[in-house]
Amino acid sequence: MIITLEDLAVAIATRVDIDMESALKDANFVMDLFGFEDRIIDNILEPEDRQLFYILEEEGMLLTEREETTIYDGRSWRTHYWFLNKGTILKYKEEEKRKRKTKEKTDRDTAEIYDEIPDELWFGH
């Protein structure tokens, strides 16, 4: 399953309730970090960047995972990862597409109502 920049931007704009331009910037930042990978290691993030990741995690677009390894001296070493939740991102995008289609249909139906009104009613007596 492939997620495009637009997929993520639409999901962010819809769920985080920001304009599309800001959503595109955030999506571009996230996609640049992930590149062609499905997961990234948490320690590549700056603290202020991590804030966006927490927001996206709250909306279900990112998931976290922790891996624990025992190192040579017996201590545990924890590594934290971020994953793109592709299914959720695509679901949000599809929901937005359905909303737009419904709105367009409603707008068209409303316009057709006006087309049915005879000219003489528009212009009065």
Image (cartoon, helix red, strand yellow):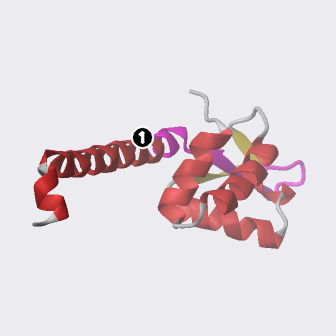
On whether residue 75 falls in the magenta region, the answer is: yes
Give whichever of 92, 96 is nearer the camera.
Answer: 96
Quarter in which the N terminus is drawn: top right
Q: Is residue 7 left or right of residue 49?
A: left
Residue under label 1: 94
Find residue 74 and report its horizontal and vertical position in percent: 83, 54
Task: Look at the image and give the residue range highlighted in magenta.
Answer: 69-91
* x 19%, y 52%: residue: 114
Give whichever of 106, 33 is nearer the camera.
Answer: 106
Q: Is residue 50 left or right of residue 103?
A: right
Can you see residue 59?
no
Q: Residue furthest top?
A: 1
* x 61%, y 50%: residue: 9
Q: Quadrant of residue 44?
A: bottom right
Helix, strand, or loop for circle 1?
helix
Q: Is residue 28 left or right of residue 4?
A: right
User: What is the crowding at mark 1: few (fewer than 14 residues within 10 Å), some, or many (at least 20)?
Assistant: some
* Number of marks in picture: 1
Q: Quadrant of residue 25?
A: bottom right
* x 34%, y 46%: residue: 104
Kind of residue indicated by mark 1? Glu
